[in-house]
């Protein structure tokens, strides 16, 4: 399906695919109730993409920053009288959310200061401009990247990800989505050659999606990690176990 012309106004509007509260299925924040903001549009086309509805087609709406911030606030469910309640995390994902970084920065500034925002980025957008815009939040640990380095099995080629690796901080996380042994060897090589301060390294096995019919067996990946005693974190996507076969709203 062809995309209709999709342009947001930087800092004013978003192209939104979906917004929903769910359980975070990835990263070191796995298991936490989180508000997901899935923005529309992507600079890449990974063969195993499990969010193509946010990459191509007409499944998006242009919405103002204030409108999106209002919907996020509505889902937080905070209670002044009960400190055990209220969502504390917002995950900006897509598509590639940093294509809309000016609007994200504005939304973050207008939301409660105690929230932790994770930015799931594909690694191929230069982080510097957004970083400068949200510097105070980054210094406070409230804006964190979960940054992919694209492996060969994605059908994409990592280029900017190597420079971005040098810009990460200990609060950030690097994710390799692995389709096979070749991707595993590639990820090991990147970790050996390209130092990063990010303290969490995620190895996530591919699951069948888009053009890919067969995933990588998590047990096989676990065996490789154990054989090499790698300091990485095996990361199956738990939302796919909780809600099998469901693509949207999880
Ligand atoms: S970068 Fe992410 S959203 Fe874009 S095509 Fe790849 S997997 Fe899909």
Image (cartoon, rainbow, N blue to C red):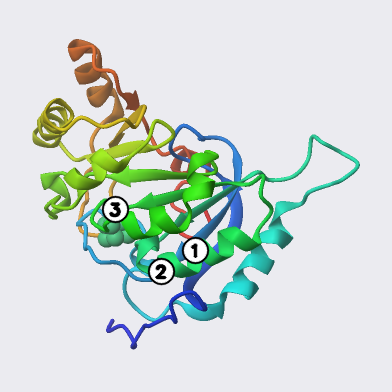
Image coordinates for residue 216, horizontal then vertical, percent: 23, 36
Q: Pick whichever, 131 or 214, lies toward us.
A: 131
Mark before the other along the chain sequence, 3 or 2:
2
Q: CA distance from mark 2 to mark 1?
A: 6 Å
Inter-mark Cα distance, 3 to 1: 16 Å
Residue drawn 23% across and 19% down? 225
Q: Residue 57: x, y in percent?
A: 34, 78
Query: Which element is circle 3 on?
Result: loop
Q: Which residue is mark 2?
A: 100
Quadrant of the rendered image containing residue 130: bottom left
Which residue sits at x=21%, y=63%? 45
Mark 3 beta carbon near ligand 1 (under 8 Å)? yes
Q: Is mark 1 within 8 Å of ligand 1?
A: no
Task: Between label 3 and label 1, give the one nearer the viewer.
Answer: 1
The numbered mark at residue 122 is: 3
Q: Which residue is mark 1?
A: 104
Left or right of 66? Residue 176 is: left
User: How many residues crowd mark 3 within 10 Å: few (<14), some (14–19), many (20+)?
Assistant: many
């Amino acid at each position: 399906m062809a995309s209709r012309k999709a342009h947001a106004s930087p800092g004013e509007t978003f192209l939104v695919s979906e917004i929903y509260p769910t359980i975070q299925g990835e990263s070191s924040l796995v298991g936490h109730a989180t508000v997901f903001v899935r923005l529309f549009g992507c600079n890449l086309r990974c063969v195993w993409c499990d969010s193509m509805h946010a990459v191509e087609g007409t499944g998006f709406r242009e919405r103002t920053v204030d409108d999106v911030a209002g919907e996020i606030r509505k889902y937080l469910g905070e209670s002044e009288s009960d400190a055990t309640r209220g969502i504390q995390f917002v995950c900006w994902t897509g598509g590639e959310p940093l294509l809309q970084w000016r609007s994200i920065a504005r939304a973050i500034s207008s939301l409660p200061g105690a929230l932790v925002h994770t930015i799931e980025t594909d690694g191929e957008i230069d982080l510097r401009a957004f970083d400068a815009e949200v510097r105070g939040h980054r210094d406070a640990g409230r804006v964190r990247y979960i940054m992919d380095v694209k492996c060969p099995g994605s059908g994409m080629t990592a280029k900017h990800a190597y420079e971005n690796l040098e810009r990460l901080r200990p609060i950030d996380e690097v994710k390799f989505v692995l389709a096979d042994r070749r991707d595993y060897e590639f990820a090991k090589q990147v970790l050996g050659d390209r130092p990063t301060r990010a303290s969490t390294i995620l190895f996530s096995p591919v699951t069948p999606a888009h053009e890919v019919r067969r995933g990588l067996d998590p047990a096989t990946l676990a065996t490789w990690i154990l054989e090499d005693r790698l300091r990485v974190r095996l990361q199956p996507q738990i939302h796919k176990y909780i809600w099998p076969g469901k693509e949207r709203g999880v």
